[in-house]
Amino acid sequence: MIFGFNTDVKHGDTVYHVQSEARESEELLQTQVFMRGRCVGKRAVSYAASATQTAVGDSQKEQQLRDQHRLVLEAIREGQLENVLDHAETEALAAIKQLDLQWENAASVHANRNLTMQLCVTEAGAPVSGARLTFRFARPEAAPFYTQAVSDAAGAAKISIEVEESALPDSSVLVQATHEGRTVTRKFALRKAE
């Protein structure tokens, strides 16, 4: 079973995006914290040892992940985020060469009842071909819509979603690009054209 949680939380003037997921292949429950689209740290707990001793069911893993997600949210609200992050992981994140994701057509995304996003995936300024992009389009009073794309030789990827322009100010798009074990996640706010 695949499950996860995504929450935006504010501390002072800063909005953090907290994303928690069960990473089955690594037997980890991982929570990542993003600020302005960049991962600023994470907390990961292995359930491998307990899984070999006792049967750890999906409901137990989901509850553990939910508790971990809540712990990080509360730490942010209290200004204590550094106290709950894995410090070795945070330092490693700063040293690792990361992917970058640019929104190429941010000024003109809506036409003919379609939201069209053109993005470019790069690494150290060079285009990344074959990156998998997952888009999560969230709007009020509707289930999130997911779609995927793969970047071309120029690092470019494009998606189009049918949506009324009036829904844009209350909507957002979360995009995650993954390539050869590296990931970048960005959250984009949408707005109605002026």
Image (cartoon, helix red, strand yellow):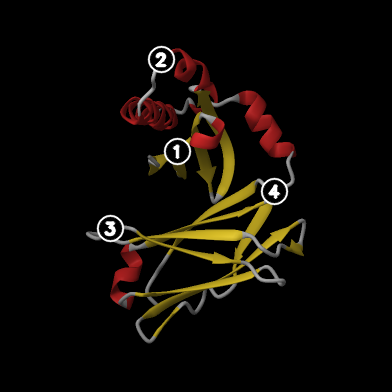
- Find residue 153 and report its image quarter: bottom right
Q: Nearer the viewer, residue 83 or 129?
A: 129
CA gap, disc 2 to disc 4? 37 Å
Identify the residue at horizontal 58%, vertical 25% (top origin): 86
| Up/down of 13 relative to 162, above or below | above
Residue type at the position of mark 3: Ala
Residue type at the position of mark 1: Glu
| Relative to 168, 22 lies left or right | right
Label at residue 143: 3
Marks 1, 4: nearer the viewer:
1
The residue carrying pointer 4 sits among few (fewer than 14), some (14 to 19) or many (20 or more) residues within 10 Å by Cα, namely: some
Q: Nearer the viewer, residue 69 or 131?
A: 131
Identify the residue at horizontal 60%, vertical 51% (top origin): 184
Label at residue 21: 1
Residue 186 placed where, x, y %?
53, 55
**Dot placed on the residue nearer the N-terminal end, 4 or 3:** 4
The reply to whether the C-beta atoms of the residues labelled 2 and 3 are less than 8 Å apart is: no
The residue carrying pointer 1 sits among few (fewer than 14), some (14 to 19) or many (20 or more) residues within 10 Å by Cα, namely: many
CA gap, disc 1 to disc 4? 20 Å
The reply to whether the C-beta atoms of the residues labelled 3 and 1 are less than 8 Å apart is: no
Label at residue 170: none
| Up/down of 52 relative to 1, above or below | above
Q: Which residue is mark 4?
A: 98
CA gap, disc 3 to disc 1? 19 Å
Residue 19 placed where, x, y %?
45, 41
The reply to whether the C-beta atoms of the residues labelled 1 and 4 are less than 8 Å apart is: no
Q: Which residue is mark 2?
A: 54
Marks 2, 4: nearer the viewer:
2
